[in-house]
Image: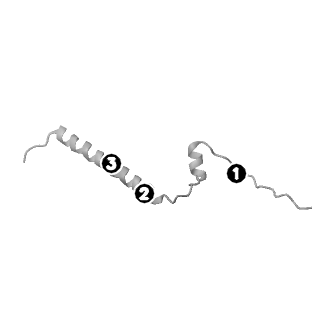
Amino acid sequence: MARKSRTAVLKRQREAKKAEKAQFKRDKRAARETDDTGEPRIATRDELAGYGYAEDEEEPVEEAEEA
């Protein structure tokens, strides 16, 4: 068998990586489209923390007592 050149191997690796990235993007887009329920999505505490909007604990809302 012929010896494979280093550039051919690197080219195949780049092509494979590019194909994997494209497949990942297609899968991610398909998942987003199937998850769309038409209702607004509410961010979780972890997501808010990732955006820098972390709060410690929610303060309990005190209800006004009827007299």
Measuring 22% from the left and 40% from the top, which residue is drawn there?
10
Mark positioned earlier in the residue sequence (1 or 2): 2
- Where in the figure is residue 44, as x and y percent of width and height? 59, 53
- The image quadrant where one finds the C terminus is bottom right
CB-based contact (under 8 Å), mark 3 and mark 1: no
Task: Name which residue lies at 70% across and 51% down.
Answer: 57
Residue 52 drawn above or below residue 35: above
Q: Residue furthest top?
A: 7
| Label 2 crowd bin: few (<14), some (14–19), many (20+), radius 10 Å | few
The x, y position of residue 11, in whole percent, is 21, 41
Tag 3: amino acid: Ala
Question: Residue under circle 3?
Answer: 22
* Residue 60 location, quadrant: bottom right
Q: Nearer the viewer, mark 3 or mark 1?
A: 3
Q: CA distance from mark 3 to mark 2?
A: 14 Å
Residue 40 image position (x, y, % from top left): 57, 55
> Mark 1 against mark 2, which lies toward the viewer?
2
Alpha carbon separation for disc pair 1 and 2:
32 Å
> Mark 2 sits on what residue?
31
Question: In this rendering, would 18 be left or right of 32?
Answer: left
Please, what secondary structure does the residue beneath circle 2 have? helix
